[in-house]
Amino acid sequence: MNQVFCQSCGMPITEDSIFGTEINGHKSVDYCIYCYEGGAFKQPNLTVAEMIEICVPYMVEDGMEKEEALSILQKTMPFLKRWRDEEELMQPIFKTLDGFTFTGISTRTNNANESKPNGKIPMMWSKYYGQGVAAKIPNQLDSKETVALYSDYESDVTGDYDFSIGAMVKHGEKIPDGLVVKTVPASHYAVFTTKVGKITDIVQMAWLDIWKWFETTGVRRTYSGDFELYDERCSDPGHSQVDIYIAIQR
């Protein structure tokens, strides 16, 4: 199963009853029932700014500060299908990589929790840089690369997974306290390259395209280990580019 968001309001669609309907009665693959029914938008003249105003109170009701909700929606909503420029989804290239060993810090989370204000991933990045974790990782293959690893999936995008930040290493022996070792198997990957921009924005936007790409192509993920690769192109956080590797069946 792939993560599905309404491509009008951005709401996660977690069950079939939330999907909108087409004119023939079939469920829409893009929109929720609150935005779309019978093959048409319920508020056809709505602007993206007006949709953001509608959505903010719901996010506040879920515990998010108004300013934070507004900031997130302003960054993400223009990239949803209903509002974005008529351009194709980001298209991957395909690579096969040998397995590798990873060392870094790790936590357990899921996508539902990460959509809330108290998500663990931003705190992990703060910990990684604030505590100088990179300098504590021995035997790095490339000290200029940082890896954000998604592994140990419980099931699919709806289940828990380990999120880790660190580096690929030659071997994982004698690691310092507080670090973990992960072994990622050899795999075929769909590799998505983000646009160039502010690092906190481009990765988030890329994941929206990635989920949509898998939803529309039928390519199946293996959930054996996915990762974001931050290299020399990320030296300027305001002008960065990231590669995202998604393990796929072949």
Image: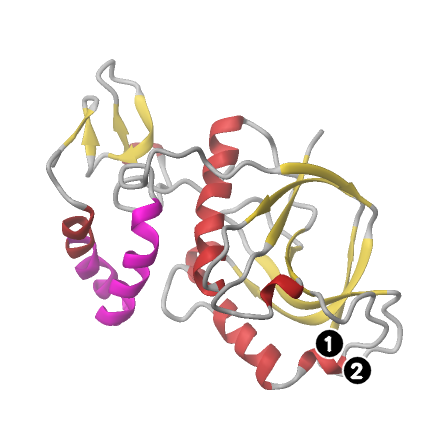
Horizontal side, residue 56 vs residue 79: left or right: left
Give the CA separation, mark 1 to mark 2: 6 Å
Q: Residue at x 61, y 78 (%)?
A: 128
Q: Position of residue 240 (x, y in %)?
A: 54, 62
Q: Residue at x 61, y 32 (%)?
A: 220
Q: Main secondary structure of the magenta part?
A: helix
Q: Secondary structure at mark 1?
A: loop
Q: Residue at x 27, y 41 (%)?
A: 83
The answer to whether residue 197 shows anywhere in this view is yes
User: Residue 30: which numbered mark, if any?
Assistant: none
Q: Residue at x 58, y 44 (%)?
A: 192
Badge 2 density bin: few <14, some 14–19, many ≥20, Cα 10 Å = few
Q: Position of residue 223 (x, y in %)?
A: 64, 44
Q: Identify residue for label 1.
A: 179
User: Residue 176: which numbered mark, if any?
Assistant: 2
For the magenta stretch, what is the residue range?
54-79
Q: Position of residue 151 (x, y in %)?
A: 66, 55
